């Protein structure tokens, strides 16, 4: 296990200050579409009580036309700190949406300027704003003027390898009033392929005064430490590493605060968490929760004997009871396998 340099360890031991908001953790849970709903955030928060959580990204245009707030915007008054992430290309719609988000309880407003998905970029949102810095600037200015909570930005290093514009873009966001920027170290063209180029995040950190959060390829405590050392960032944001593993944010946070590694959950521990996640999704969303749970169950079922077969079975669940029965059988098999292993070692 690598250790942080003394200088970085000292800086990261203090609270993270996002404008007027002070966070007692340097590890953040990324907004993930179709994932970071209220149920998932509660699981992550159990292991990372001080960390900033983010809602799934919400369309300001859709919010403008809806009479009621969408369920993905719902936050628990107890789940602080919480940020509501918005996306769009219309400054006025985003300002209006930000006001609704603050009324809902958001501690900060995050603007997505990094999503690479075609259906978002074709409408001028997400990472397409990297190619429209004047629009991005107008958005940040208008949202900052509309709300009294800090406004932050999440983006990428550029559109493609020929258009890595993050340094000028980040400075513009800061100059327009953004209080923190999270940088995913890939271009839009990369999607989630190749490696996150942390060296670009380091360069962003060198030119900004506001906090810079590193994002991309944070899958373990070890990778978080390496990323922090390479980038000198003010914190890390965990994304895909938390799929089927809501323990990750807490594990990194615990290490940064104590210098100690928490024991990783056993396969049985992960499956017990999967059962809880399944039940909670059904309680919160009904039948739709069962459908959404299938992908979560597949993410939990990895890294142990029989996991591939278990994933196939869980992809077909149609009731909570069906899913729990399948998982319970897998737990029994793992228990029996562990007992056999112990017996073999004893002989």
Image: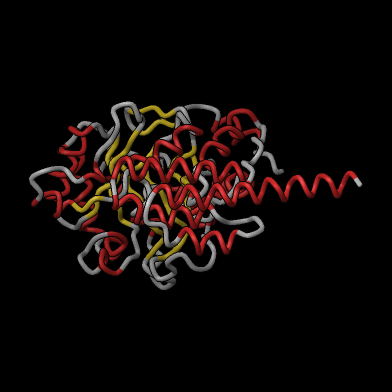
- How is the protein colored in the picture? secondary structure
Of residues 346 and 163, the one nearer the viewer is: 346
Q: Tell me the quarter of the picture where residue 98 sits.
A: top left
Seen in the picture, residue 168 relative to 69 is either above or below; the reply is below
Query: Residue lying farthest bottom?
Result: 162
Left-right relation of 147 to 245: left
Q: Is residue 203 visible?
A: no
Q: Residue at x 37, y 56 (%)?
A: 318
Residue that protrudes farthest toward the right in the picture: 347
Looking at the image, residue 134 lies above or below residue 44: below
Q: Nearer the viewer, residue 267 or 320?
A: 320
Place of residue 344 in the rendered image (x, y in percent of width and height, measured from the top left): 85, 50
Residue 343 left/right relative to 200? right
Quadrant location of the N terminus in the rendered image: top right
Question: Looking at the image, which residue is at 51% across and 41% down?
Answer: 273
Question: Percent from the top left, x then y, of residue 237?
Answer: 46, 45
**Count of numbered tags:** 0
- In the figure, residue 158 lies in which quadrant? bottom left
Q: Is residue 206 left or right of residue 64?
A: right
Q: Identify which residue, 203 or 278, lies in the foreground.
A: 278
Residue 346 in view in this figure: yes
Where is residue 222 drawn, in percent x and y? 64, 46
Residue 44: x and y in percent read 46, 38
User: What residue do we see at 66% from left, 32% from top?
Assistant: 259
The quadrant in which residue 29 appears is top left
State the residue at coordinates (49%, 40%): 235
């Amino acid at each position: 296990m690598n250790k942080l340099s003394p200088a970085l360890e000292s800086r990261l031991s203090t609270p993270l200050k996002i404008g007027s908001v002070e966070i007692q953790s340097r590890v953040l849970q990324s907004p993930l579409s179709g994932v970071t709903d209220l149920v998932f955030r509660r699981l992550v928060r159990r292991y990372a009580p001080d960390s900033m959580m983010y809602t799934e990204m919400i369309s300001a245009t859709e919010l403008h036309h809806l009479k009621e707030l969408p369920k993905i915007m719902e936050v628990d008054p107890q789940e602080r700190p919480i940020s509501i992430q918005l996306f769009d290309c219309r400054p006025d719609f985003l300002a209006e949406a930000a006001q609704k988000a603050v009324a809902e309880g958001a501690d900060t407003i995050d603007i997505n300027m990094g999503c690479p998905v075609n259906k978002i970029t074709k409408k001028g949102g997400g990472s397409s704003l990297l190619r429209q810095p004047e629009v991005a600037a107008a958005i940040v200015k208008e949202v900052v003027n509309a709300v009294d909570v800090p406004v932050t930005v999440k983006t990428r290093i550029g559109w493609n390898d020929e258009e890595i514009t993050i340094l000028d873009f980040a400075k513009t966001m800061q100059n327009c009033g953004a209080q923190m920027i999270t940088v995913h170290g890939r271009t839009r063209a990369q999607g989630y392929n190749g490696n996150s180029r942390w060296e670009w995040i380091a360069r962003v950190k060198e030119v900004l005064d506001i906090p810079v959060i590193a994002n991309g390829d944070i899958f373990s405590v070890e990778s978080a430490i390496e990323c922090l050392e390479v980038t000198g960032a003010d914190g890390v944001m965990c994304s895909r590493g938390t799929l089927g593993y809501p323990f990750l944010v807490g594990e990194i946070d615990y290490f940064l605060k104590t210098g100690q590694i928490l024991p990783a959950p056993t396969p049985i521990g992960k499956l017990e968490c999967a059962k809880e996640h399944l039940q909670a999704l059904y309680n919160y969303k009904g039948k739709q929760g069962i459908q959404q749970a299938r992908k979560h169950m597949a993410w939990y079922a990895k890294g142990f004997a029989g996991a591939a077969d278990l994933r196939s079975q869980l992809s077909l669940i149609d009731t909570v009871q069906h899913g729990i029965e399948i998982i319970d059988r897998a737990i029994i098999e793992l228990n029996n396998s562990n007992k056999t292993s112990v017996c073999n070692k004893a002989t």
